[in-house]
Amino acid sequence: MKLLLVEDSPRLRETLTRGLRAAGFTVDTANDGVEATGYIGTFQYDFVLLDLGLPRLDGFGVLRALPESGTRPRVLVLSARDQVADRIAALNAGADDYLIKPFAFEEALARLHALARRPAETRKDVLERAEVVLDARSQRATANGRPLNLTPREFALLELLLRHRGRVFSRAAIQERIAGSSSEASDRSIEVLVFGLRRKLSEAGCEGLIENRRGVGYLIE
């Protein structure tokens, strides 16, 4: 799952980024509202973690910049503003949830998982294809009932292809969704990533699950 963290405190931004990546998220970061709207206008995100007191453009400006289409990310506001009026204003402006600073990281993570489970979302925690079962919440995957020993990037790639079955992803699209928009990963590194995942699936008896459309990209039907 891909997430944009918008926070102007370097210390909190770095702490949250480490924790979120360890929890399996692909994380981009922005330290002000203008930078955040640039990311939102260019890339697709599942979640936005948003501070309200941002330089250049505040959190309400970022909320107004969110797309109105079905690709709109879920927004969890993280703010020191603890008045009821602040929470109401943010929710009315388009936020999906509101967490007051200081907070426990575990609570922020639980709220993200709760947002992913909301009925309005088409997201599912458990994804299945043939004999492969992936549990996005527990970060576990099995093939023919046996655990798949996947790296975090291999797991993220498998989740991406299972969640969007039938959609072809180019190397550039995989790089952007898995490695992060600021990553300098090369086409070669994406090929190695795909090769490693396909090898592990093949060894588990699921050969051919990931198809290669030559010159276009990869998919799971």
Image (cartoon, grey):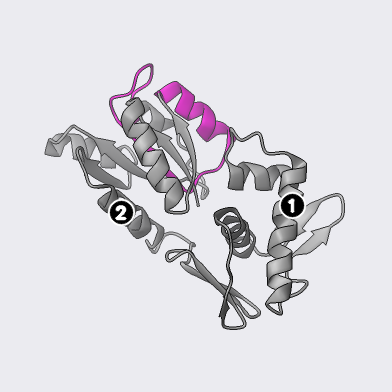
| Residue neighbourhood size for the residue with mark 1, other residues' Cα within 10 Å, grouped as few (<14), some (14–19), many (≥20) | few
Could you say where residue 193 lies in the image, as x and y percent from the top left? 69, 53
**Residue situated furthest left in the rendering:** 83
For the residue marked with disc 1, what is the amino acid?
Answer: Val
Asked if residue 5 is positioned above or below residue 134 in the image, the reply reads: above
What residue is drawn where x is 19% and y is 34%?
A: 86
Q: Tag on residue 184?
A: none
Label 2 – label 1 distance at C-alpha: 34 Å
- In the depicted view, which residue is nearer to us: 139 or 40? 139
Q: Which residues are magenta?
A: 32-60
- Going from N to C along the chain, the mark reached first, 2 or 1, is 2
Q: Is residue 74 visible?
A: no
Q: Residue 132 lies in what quarter of the image? A: bottom right
Q: Is residue 27 left or right of residue 208?
A: left
Could you say where residue 151 lies in the image, as x and y percent from the top left? 58, 58
Say which of marks 2 and 1 sits in front. Answer: 1
Asked if residue 42 is positioned above or below residue 125 in the image, the reply reads: above
Please check the rendered image and state whether residue 59 is part of the magenta-colored stretch, yes or no.
yes
What residue is drawn where x is 87% and y is 55%?
A: 214
Locate the C terminus and report the quarter of the image it occupies: bottom right
Q: Tag on residue 111?
A: 2
- In the depicted view, which residue is nearer to us: 205 or 90? 205
Could you say where residue 159 lies in the image, as x and y percent from the top left? 58, 61
Q: Which residue is mark 1?
A: 192
Q: Is residue 171 left or right of residue 213?
A: left
- In the depicted view, which residue is nearer to us: 214 or 21? 21
